[in-house]
Amino acid sequence: MDYVSGEILTDEGFKKGYIGFEKKRIVETGKGIPQKKPICSGLIVPTFINAHTHIGDSFIRKKNIELPRTVEELVAPPNGLKHRLLKEASEEEIIIGMRNSVETMTKDGVSCFCDFRENGIRGINQIKKSMKNIHISSLILSRPERLEYNRDETKLLLENSDGIGPSSISDWDYAELEKVAKHTKKEGKIFAIHASERIREDIDQILNLKPDFLVHMVFATDDDLERVKDDDIPIVVCPRSNMFYGLKPNIKLLKKHEVDVLVGTDNAMLNMPSILDEIKYIKTISKEFSTEELLTMITYAPRKALNADYNIPAPDFPTDFVVLDEKSLKPLYISKY
């Protein structure tokens, strides 16, 4: 049996101890020193969940082209540069790019990611192909081909994905978006949406869609965040992506209103989808959240928000954990569950 020791992150914070494991199962946990020298010591945390990605645009990162630095020009549907490049790219090019991003996440200790998937049913099939024979889970939030509700298309998307993840209310005719949201919720699937990313958007319209979580909320006001908190809706922040456009999430305001914060890496054409790099970046732009809080945002908080398995390190659980260097947060050991 092998051991790791150090500070174990639980849903109640860090607790000093050790974990003993063999045959991909945790056999024992305890306080103090293990009976055998540990293979490494550090911060022991559950594997990570990347709460917001767009890995379909990974291939663009290798094109070495200058990208516009406004949300509208680069990613807004239907005519943003990203969407034009997706239409021009071959199936193989897109899938290879996706697979590279998926492999990057597994090497970073990510066991699950939530992807907003463009290109309708074709986009769903592409991401499933990219994950073949890679041990990682995904929540696929699909997206209609056009900015309009089509009952048959929405039904097909929901049958083949975990829900729907539109761009924003600013891109849609609101009545059409309402139909998509209602259909999604009727089927018991996830509905999530980008909100107040480049401008402040109407919080009443956003919340009327009954979202399971929101992404960005860069321009959210105190009142907006209070409403979100009252409705118990998590917010996913993606600061590296925001900063590319000269934007910055208001970490201080999120902390003030005690909103449940998750973390994502967003567009894979801008940055490698490293969730650890994302929380390290948050530490450079704000001192509001401790390391413990940031690690909770990529472990327990998203598991709760997305109804994923908790995988708390405990006897008879799978070896679903990562050991990090306490100072650099570099992975010292990633369990192969």
Image (tube, grey):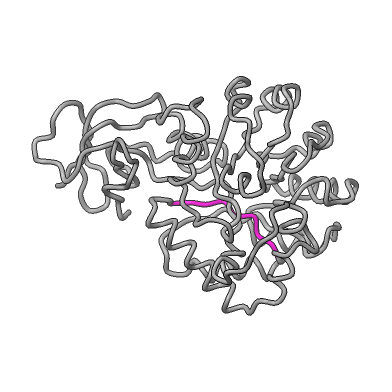
Membership of 159 in magenta stretch: no
Q: Is residue 77 above or below residue 9?
A: below
Q: Point out the image quarter for the C terminus.
A: bottom left
Q: Main structural element of the magenta stretch: helix, strand or loop?
A: strand
Camera-nearest residue between 336 and 277:
277
Direction from residue 301 to residue 227 in the image, left or right? right
Camera-nearest residue between 242 and 149:
242
Q: Would you identify the image quadrant in which residue 6 lies?
A: top left
Q: Is residue 12 above or below residue 271?
A: above
The boundaries of the magenta stretch are 111-118
Q: Would you identify the image quadrant in which residue 214 lies?
A: top right
Position in image of residue 327 (x %, y %) = 31, 36
Position in image of residue 81 (x %, y %) = 73, 65
Camera-nearest residue between 108 and 174:
108
**Residue lying at the far front of the rendered structure:** 66
**Residue lying at the far top of the rendered structure:** 256
Residue drawn where x is 80% and y is 64% of the image: 79
Position in image of residue 178 (x %, y %) = 85, 45
Numbered disc total:
0
Residue drawn where x is 49% and y is 68% of the image: 99
Position in image of residue 258 (x %, y %) = 59, 22
Camera-nearest residue between 82 and 53:
82
Residue drawn where x is 51% and y is 43% of the image: 308
Residue drawn where x is 70% and y is 28% of the image: 228
